[in-house]
Amino acid sequence: MNQKVDKLININDLRSQILEISKDGEVNQDKLRSHIFEILKDHLIQARNKSEDGLFRHGSGIRTARSISKFQDELIKIIYDFAIHHIFMSKNPTESEKVCLVAVGGYGRGTLAPFSDIDLLFLYPNKLTAWAESVIEFILYMLWDLGFKVGHATRNVDQCLNLSKSDFTIRTSILEARYIHGDIQLFKNLNEKFNKNIIAKTADEFIEMKLDERNKRHTTYGSSRYLVEPNIKESKGGLRDLHTLFWISKYLFRPEKPEDLINSDNFLTKSELNSFQKAEDFLWAIRCHLHFISNRENEVLTFDKQLELASRLGYSKRPGQKDVERFMKHYFMTAKDVGNLTRIVCASLEERSIKKEPTLYSVIDNLLNFKRNKVNNRNFSINKGRLSIRKNTIFEDSPVDLIRLFVIADRENVLLSPDIVQRITRSLRFIDKNIRINKTANRLFLELFSQSSDPEKILRKMNETGVLGRFIPEFRKIEGMSLFNLYHNYTVDEHLLKTTGNMHNIISNKMPEPHPFSNIIIGNLENRKVLLIAAFLHDIGKGRKQDHSLLGSQIAERLCKRLGLKRSEINDISWLITNHLLMSDIAQKRDLYDPKTISDFAKIIQNQKNLDSLLALTVADILSVGPSIWNAWKNGLLKTLHYQTTAFLKGNDKKYPKNENLSLIAKETFKKNNIQWPSPILKSYVDRFNDSYWITTDLALQIEHSKILRDKDSSNISLEIFTTKNEESNTTIITLIGPDYPNLLSTLAGACLLYDVNIVDAQIETTIDGIAIDTISVKREFSDNDEDRRIKKIADTIKKSLGGSLSLSKELLKKKHAISYEKTFKVDNIVSLTNEFSNYSTVIEIEARDKPGLLYEITNTLRATNINIKSAHIATFGERANDVFYVTNLFDEKIDSEEKINRIKNLLISNLEENN
């Protein structure tokens, strides 16, 4: 471990300055304190600047943290000495007039981040005297005035011991106690009694408590160590996990130095200790840089900070990977190393039976995620629900058993024993090229996809022990790989494991609500193995220059051939990986009621098996991106696309006749539902609408529209706004019916922006006699009453804006939008126009950085080009917005003029660049 400490300031010079000022007998105590404060403040700034310079120079986080802690010690010593010699002088101090200053908590370990809290224990002999109280108060106020956050306690030795018996936080703080200044005998007395009366008798309960505390912390900060914005201190695999190992080792062995742990009943090997120290130094470097960048205490690696940290730490970009992604991969692999160390230590604890049943097994069960059972095998045995090896050279003699052991553990539903966990870690070198092409090894690996009751769990265990990456080198390349965007919540390897788990749940019909569609397709999912392998490999091509879907398909084909799959299975897996983004893209970016959308999609899909399999993979994929990515809206879109395409594939002529007959069928359906109308009125009403209205508008909305429009025309229509709630998609549908204002959709988008309402879809229609029917779907984010009030405000704003009594543009200028860090991410503006996707409309697709008011900005631009927006499909993928508009010219036809297409495209790009 790096024991070097930088000299941040010249302590002797500082003491001399203070002594010189203190000699001035003419200066009163208040002025004297003020002078001292200014001197200390200046030196504090110098020390922080020098520690940051040192961090850039030598790069060692632990050295920086120790240097800051050492400076803090000296600062406290100076304040204490000044207090007792110049402020609260006692010529004949009694035995009671003693104080000992003790560092506890993280400060007690001798490491401090630049803006961390400092934890102090003020020890006094028996009773707290007025003199001691004054000294302590002086020290605290000086530290507070200097800007430190100070956690402090004032106790005698007996109080410390009594409280530590019942309060584990206090016990942990005293475990880390370190003498700073004052009466050292008080500290020695505390240390001696604490070791004898507390530590010697309570090792088992302390370790149990610390591991339980660790599990609860992981629940609070995220149970995955692969969250893309981790808390450097508290997240799984962070510094706090290393601290837990430190506390346990110190409680058990009281090591004088880290190297002592190697000799402590083989607690750690030399290699494992080196891994501990490297991880600690790297995590401390990140933490110190993070504090300096933020100019405050900050432990969260947010995206905006990751960029600067990557630059500070000297990472450079590589083909297919940004510098920040390489930095975060290093972080996640370090977090994985911390996880390995934790497992090794827990295994070592169990082996020595420090913890008792059932507590020990419950903790380890939680760690390893298995249950216990009994069975025997030629090379393995099961003892107390743990799979163990029969001889130490088993993996050297038979490397295939490094794969077989996971199949057995999964089949028998048992834990891995401590000896096997350590033996696996130390035997990874035996998984070489020969094992990768071994037919038995590959057959065993495939069993995990065809027979496992929980493939995600066993694959995760293989990943954590390092076996998965060794056996599947293609997987090792994406281990710890993060994608620098707001959409993906996990690293690529974590995402693949979660997708495999979600796919298993779909296949097993274990999907909870709101995923009822799984019941629709469950009977058609023919090949469990194919689907699970496709889920496991669908993003295996990420992090390279090439399109990850195509590259992933190629990688999967080679790997599946190696694993021994049939050619038909390989083709299915390859097809699914190539197209794994297709269904999501179509559902979110295309008009699902446009017949050409469905027919074009069906040409790629080809058959029902492909459709059902792709839906399963699409849902498993989206569910595994992050906890808030899947929602009822996406569920509804995918259900609609699956239903429409199923009907098309089955040749259901009633649902999918020739395009020119679709509107006729829709009209007849509407007439049947309004048979009570007089025939001439019904015919006249139906003829008022363009064919696209009947094809794309839901029957329930058609009926709602008719209630307003039956007796109205463009001469007597006033603006009507009504809303309906869609429970399935958790959206509110807002419909505006009235005169065809040229800026209607733009006004609607602006009003939604004003009240922070997220638009997820839009449809625009105009009757032949000039009445506009604009419908948008907005995401519901509050309780029904609050949501209704918010929608009413939008409706009122639209009416006032269109009526001229309110300037929407001025109101938007006043609004302060919440600051987001989408600007951290660079997104190229891309605009495309095509006539290939629809028989009725020109399709404009816009990709840009998401921001408040983007739809308002785009619709304002489109309005200036004299085109009609027929429908809009709003999709957001983290910081990236993908908005699609189906448009026509003023004659309700496609835009076929190349000149006008280029003019629209250039105007959109110009405005997007100007406002970016």
Image (cartoon, helix red, strand yellow):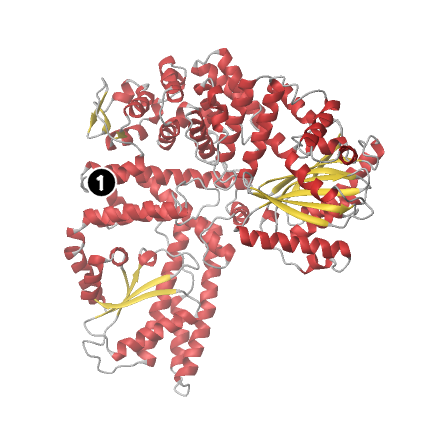
Q: Residue at x 35, y 25 (%)?
A: 453
**Residue 88, image quadrant:** bottom left
Q: Secondary structure at mark 1?
A: helix
Relative to 260, residue 501 above or below? above
- Total of numbered circles in the picture? 1
Give coordinates of residue 213: x percent, y percent: 30, 49
The residue furthest top is 567
Relative to 843, residue 607 above or below? above
Identify the residue under disc 1. Answer: 360
**Residue 900, image quadrant:** top right
Label 1 Cα crowd, 10 Å radius (few <14 / some 14-19 / many 20+)? many
Q: Nearer the viewer, residue 909 or 499?
A: 499
Q: Residue at x 55, y 19 (%)?
A: 610
**In the rendered view, does 101 fall on the left or right side of 10?**
left
Relative to 764, residue 90 above or below? below
Residue 524 makes an appearance in the image: yes
Residue 317 makes an appearance in the image: no
**In the rendered view, does 783 fall on the left or right side of 816?**
left
Instruction: Tell me which amino acid carries mark 1.
Output: Leu
**Residue 33, image quadrant:** bottom left
Q: Nearer the viewer, residue 238 or 264?
A: 238
**In the rendered view, does 113 fall on the left or right side of 746?**
left
Q: Nearer the viewer, residue 285 or 341?
A: 341
Give coordinates of residue 697: x percent, y percent: 68, 35
**In the rendered view, does 315 fall on the left or right side of 735?**
left
Give coordinates of residue 134: x percent, y percent: 31, 78
Relative to 481, residue 604 above or below? above
Give coordinates of residue 802: x percent, y percent: 76, 53
